[in-house]
Structure formats: C-alpha cells, structure tokens
Amino acid sequence: MEGIGVLLMRPLSNYIQQELAKRFTLFKYWEISDSLKLHSDSIRAVVGNGVQGANSELIDSLPRLEIVSSHSSGLDKIDLVKCKERGIRVTSTPDALTDDVADMAILLTIATLRRILEADRFVRNGIWKEKDFNLTAKFSGKSVGIVGLGRIGSAIAKRAEAFGCPISYHSRSRKPESTYTYYPHVIDLASNCQILVVACALTGETHHIINREVIDALGPNGIVINIARGSHIDEPELVSALAEGRLGGAGLDVLEHEPEVPVQLARFDNVVLSPHTAAGTLETRKDMADLVVANLEAYFSNKPLLTPVI
C-alpha cells in the first residue's frame, strides 16, 4: 500500500503518523497546504479529526479521494453530503473514546460543583493559613439531564447512576430500551434537572441547543457540562448567565471558537475549562489511531470497513 497517498490534516500523535507512514505514502497537510495541488492526484485517503476534517473545498481539490477515516466520533467537520455524492467512504472511531469522554463528563461535573480549581489555588497561594475554604455543592444524588443518549450519553448516565443520581434525557426520539425519564423538549429537561450534560452530535438542529431559554430553565443553582461540541452552547448567552448569576456554573471541554476563550469566561471561579482533551489519554488515542489505520487497511484490501459511516 506504499503507493497510496494519505493526507493527514492535523499533527496528531507521533504513533499514528508512524503507523500511517509504515503503510502508506503520508502527506501532512500543515506542510503541503500551499502546494496541495501538486500532490492531489496521489492522495486517495484523508485522515482528520474533530477539529479539522474534510470540508467541501478540500474534497473538491482531491479528485482521487476515496475514503475519509476520521480520528473522532464527531462528523461535523466532514461534508457528508458531498462524500455521498462522490461515493467517498467515511469511517469514525465511535467506541474507542466512549469511556474517556464519559469519565471527563463526571470529572468536570464534580470539579465544577466542588470548585476544585479554586480550592487548589486556595492551598497553593497560602490562603488556607488565613481562613477556611467556602462550602461547595455535592454531586451524589443530584438529578442529571443528558442531551443525547447515544454511546457517550449512555456511558455518562451509567456513571452518574453510581452516584445515586436520577437520570433523564432528551433526544430526537424516545429510546424504547431506556428506563430513564424522557423529555421531548430540551427546555423541559433543563427545568427538571440540576446538572445538564451535553452529549449529542452537532447538527443544524443541535447548534445552540443550549440557549438563553434552556439556561434560564436550568436556573441559578444548575450547572451545564459540555463534552460534545462548543457550538452546542450559545456562548455569549452562557457568559451573560454566569455573570448575572442566572446559572450556577459550567464545566467545558469544548468551546464555540476554540482555542479562543472569552476573557470573562476564563475569569469565573465557577467554571472549569479543559482544552478539548476528553479523549486525550495515551490509551484511547492509541486505540483511535489503530482503528483509523485498520479502516484504511480494510478499505484498500477490499475488506469490510470496521466502523463505516458512509
């Protein structure tokens, strides 16, 4: 397969770069973006992730493109319509990152409720010698509402259940196999939970699904957790609600215009921020890389794809 050109869109781990280079002719987009046209006839596969995938412009520039193997469970950075039109196969890494992302959701929830970052600064800065730390809020037993009860949402629910949390959810339709309380409208979900976790795919319908009405329904004692995509939340409305005390806090692994962070958001003690690293463990990144490579090997060996999307 050495003659098959694979375009890697972002500098992912050294491991995936090495594994791709062993099997294919590897092109690195950040090194050849200005001269992509010179290599376009050699590139038959694209490897992207949740930040940079294969948009319409890129697809149009690669006449021999046959497959997009995404190093992500999200597909919003891939023009799926154009891929279908051109018969381009698409794969993702859905199961490989489920546990890590679900773990991060719980971590952000507890860190936000217990103000763990503020407590850390309190100790490091010597303030503990002067006074006691303020009381915080517990997690166990609080009602958790999940927007999107797919693989990751279900894994989050399972973990929250272990803390004695009642679970409810919103999705496009009721999950007949689920025993959790279903709300057909996200505002109703927010009105009936204390912790609102965003775990759905980003689509036109879910863009800014967490808006002012939803935030106000969650209320001044509620917190919102986002481990999905930044654009699920109307960020100016989130900042406004936190500044005005209409929302109790937020734990965010993703931002709407990342890596840009609203200055005011970064100053709130009741906000915990993470740089889109929910799936960023050594173990999971290796599993994701192996799945990306395995899908490419399967395709170019005329074998069934392991995790096909298209």
Image (tube, rainbow, N blue to C red):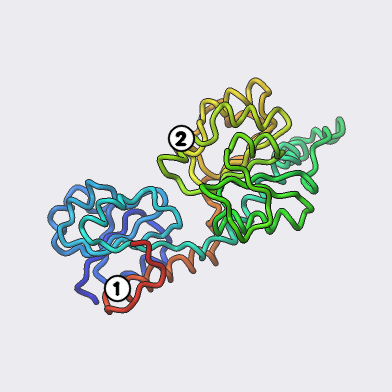
Q: Which residue is mark 1?
A: 299
**Relative image position of residue 204 (x, y in whole percent):** 40, 40
Spatial separation of the CA atoms under disc 1 and disc 2: 37 Å
Q: Work out which quarter of the rendered image holds the C terminus and state it.
A: bottom left
Residue 61 placement, left or right of 264: left
Residue 259, visible in the rendered structure: no
Q: Nearer the viewer, residue 124 or 67?
A: 67
**Residue 85 relative to residue 269: left or right:** left
SS class of the residue under badge 2? loop
Residue appearing at x 49%, y 69% in the figure: 287
Q: Residues within 10 Å of mark 1 (few under 14, many from 20)?
A: some
Q: Quadrant of residue 298?
A: bottom left
Q: Secondary structure at mark 1?
A: helix
- The residue tagged 2 is 260
Taking the spot 87% from the left edge, 31% from the top edge, the residue there is 131
Question: Could you tell me which residue is drawn at 66 percent across and 44 percent down?
Answer: 145
